[in-house]
Amino acid sequence: ALVSPAPTDLDGLHVAVSTGGTREPLDPVRFLGNRSSGRQGAEIAVEAARRGAKVTLVAASVDAGVLDAAAAHPRITVQHVETAAELGGAMSDAATAADVVVMVAAVADYRAARVSEHKLRKEDGPLETIELVPNDDILAGLAAARRDGQTVVGFAAETRDDDLLVRARRKRDRKGVDLLVVNEVGWDAGFGAGENAVAVIGDGGAVVAEASGPKDAVARTIWDAIVALRAAS
Ligand code: CTP
Ligand code: CA
């Protein structure tokens, strides 16, 4: 069989990865969520551990089975969270010891202004609107707090249109990250699928790597790009 040994280029490094989709409660039984499967983030954590890193994987809601390989890996610690606020707290804790921070999670941009203590009932009257308030931008905060020698990587799931790369470059600048991984999503692509197609945007908006195929292969390309960036700086 053609199984090449994993490179050991992350030996001794600490890595913090977030994955999955946050859930913002409306009441004890309902939430606002998204379709992120958590698969790409789990593959990124597993690949980092394969290459020798110690990994903290902060997981919001993921599809069944997605965390199995990560949970079984001796160098990966999985931490479960639900909301954006919890994910932000866990990631800023993990980032204090991390050489590389990778935010793959689909974080809710908004949460409900008020969370009902009891289940919202129709007999209380019709619910016409839900007031929302913005969540903090976790990635921008991590990038702003970045220590010397720490690499911060973001993801952007974008629906296809002509401005995809233009918007992604703006997003990279806005977040202040070293690398922004863009992947195209739609009603059927990206989320949940075993395959993905990404472009990695670096300094000056340059596309420093591209990959398409199974999410574990995409994870390898992303780590190659991170390792190359760290070697160059
Ligand atoms: N992200 C974050 N905190 C948020 C929102 C997003 O840390 N409150 C992170 C995501 O984990 C991802 C990156 O920021 O790594 C980009 O997320 P995205 O939703 O594409 O960016 P937004 O700034 O929320 O822009 P948009 O209006 O396109 O949703
Ligand atoms: Ca968003």
Image: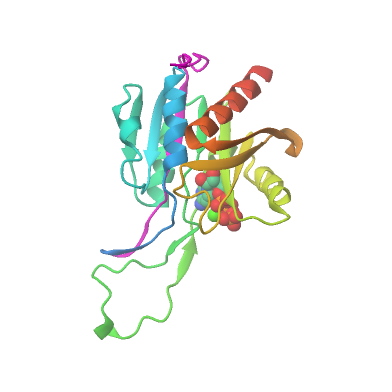
Q: Is residue 72 above or below residue 122?
A: above
Highlighted range, magenta: 1-27
Q: State left or right for residue 46 relative to residue 115.
A: right
Q: Coloring scheme of the render?
A: rainbow
Name which quarter of the figure residue 58 lies in. Answer: top left
Residue 72 visible = yes
Q: Residue at x 49, y 13 (%)?
A: 8
> In the rendering, at what x and y percent does residue 147 appear?
56, 27
* Overall secondary structure of the magenta section: loop
Q: Residue at x 39, y 34 (%)?
A: 57
| Residue 15 magenta-highlighted | yes
> In the rendering, at what x and y percent does residue 25 appear?
34, 61
> In the rendering, at what x and y percent does residue 12 appear?
45, 15
| Residue 191 magenta-highlighted | no
> In the rendering, at what x and y percent does residue 20 appear?
41, 46
Split into 4 quadrants, where in the image is the N terminus? top left
Residue 177 visible = no
